[in-house]
Amino acid sequence: MARFRFPLLIALGLFVAGLALTSALKDRHYMLLSLVLLAVTLLPLFLRLERRPLESRELVLLAVLSAVAAVSRIPFAALPSVKPVSAIVILSAYVFGAEAGFIIGAVAALVSNIYFGQGPWTPWQMFAWGMVGLTAGWLRNTWWMKKKGGMLAFGFVWGFLFGWIMNIWYLISLPDAFSWGLVATAYASSFYLDLAHALSNVFFLAVLAGGWTKVLKRFRKKYGLLQE
Amino acid sequence: MSSGFRSMHPSVAMVYYAGLLLFAALLFHPLFLATEIAGLTFLLVLQGQGRGLLRGLPFYLLMAVSVAVLNPLFSHRGAHILFYFMDQPITLEAVLYGLMMMLVLLTVFILFISYNYTVTTDKFMYLFAAAAPRTTLLTLMTMRFVPLFQRRLRQITLIQRIRGVDAGKGSLRSRMRDGMTLLKVLLTWSLEEALQTADSMKARGYGIRKRSVYGIYKLDLQDKAMLLLFTVSGWIPLFFWMKGYGVLDIYPRMKPMHLGWADAAMYASFCVFVLTPLALEGKEKWLWRSSRHSSYPSATLKKTGTRFMSSHLR
């Protein structure tokens, strides 16, 4: 059985992708297709995690940072869009790079949803927070990201982008009503939540930035972790 | 305690929920969706999870109903115009389509409530341990760290309060500074200790060879029978769906629903797929009840046939 696991998984994946395409083309029903596309975008970076040479220290480091991000979400459970996760993911990616940032964001979303409830939004959150980490890692060497103001602005923008990505899974359930009016309505109704997320990102980044990057950089140097 | 459907092998539960999700996304038909919702709700109630369902319901209803309301406001397809709202025609078909989408969303929400109860994360990880060992290990370690860090944070708070560092007292500015100190202590402490864990992992040979997998679940005869049943009864509706059955065309005008033999066969097979866990759970309940009512001549309990998790650990 174990020998056939990979061919079996690939065959299953292709089968579901085929069904999703048929459903999207025939019935204009995009739910399944969106899930397949999300899986396809998450796959390469997780495959890379599986394949690349990785010290056990680095693996544990990723786990610790994901866990800290997941834990940080719990005290703020009552406030729907105040999520320190984004700030922690940005800071970790800033120090350890894009791939680490992606993994930390995605795993933090997956694990914190064990406490908040898994749902159709879990892959979307994994994608959104993964992208927060990935972009923060890509832009970490630009001159403005190294300034505190630049990083705060980056957090502010991602507060809105995160909400906009999360609105998509809701919008695709209305294929026939899709129009700029609907998009505007959905995005306007989530505006205050997104604003709260953006402002809380700025707040947490402002509070954590100096101290945390120093601690993380020290660990990176002392143990030689995730040097590229 | 896990018994009944929860005690089946993780792959059985995974096939069941994956199948249900597939059906919810593909079979755009009120009869199928309503059956799925009814089946899952009844399963949750039988498992004693009715309260959890009720707690989540207001949020889910809000999401689902807003879809039903938004669709006719923004989609004007369809032949029957009911009335005009702000100069925009509201069509019967758009209202029906919105209601159907509401059903789809409700099905998916209830499905995940049931999934969260039955397929706990350790079972999910067990299934993927062989395919993605590193991701699985990473996720499991993260999961384990969450309660540990919460406990640690409480300890740190207690100790630092004696030093006068207290995130619950003082001006906003000093509280922010103190809260940050607490988090920083947590970060440094956890990182230091986790790196020691990593060194000890390395000392014991982690990463030298391909990781072997230890499985605590055993696929027994009943699990295999269930897998076979799910596969067969799941294929039939999919096959008919590919032939064009099981989807209700609403636009441009709703087709009348008629039940031919093909629809009947498809629905029957779908029901077998959806309702089998209910039968398992019901059998369990019935055995438990009947075992309580009979009196035993000896102090040793008779074997009732109640099913528990079959594992090597027993």
Image (cartoon, coloured by chain):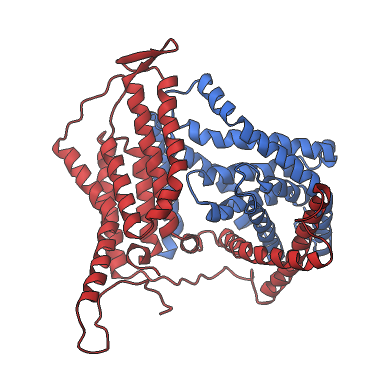
Chain colours: A blue, B red
Residue drawn at 75 percent across, 60 percent down: B187
Query: In this rendering, would A206 be left or right of A85?
Result: right
Q: Position of residue A91 (x, y in %)?
A: 75, 48
- The answer to whether one can see residue B62 in this image is yes
Q: Position of residue A10 (x, y in %)?
A: 45, 50
What is the quadrant of the N terminus of chain B in the image? bottom left
| Residue furthest bottom as drawn | B298
The answer to whether residue A74 is above or below residue B313 is: above
The residue lying toward the viewer, choosing from A228 and A29, is: A29
The answer to whether residue A179 is above or below residue A100 is: above
Q: Position of residue A158 (x, y in %)?
A: 68, 37
The residue lying toward the viewer, choosing from A12 and A117, is: A117
The answer to whether residue B133 is above or below residue A154 is: below
Q: Position of residue B67 (x, y in %)?
A: 43, 31
Residue drawn at 64 percent across, 51 percent down: A73
- The answer to whether one can see residue A175 in this image is no
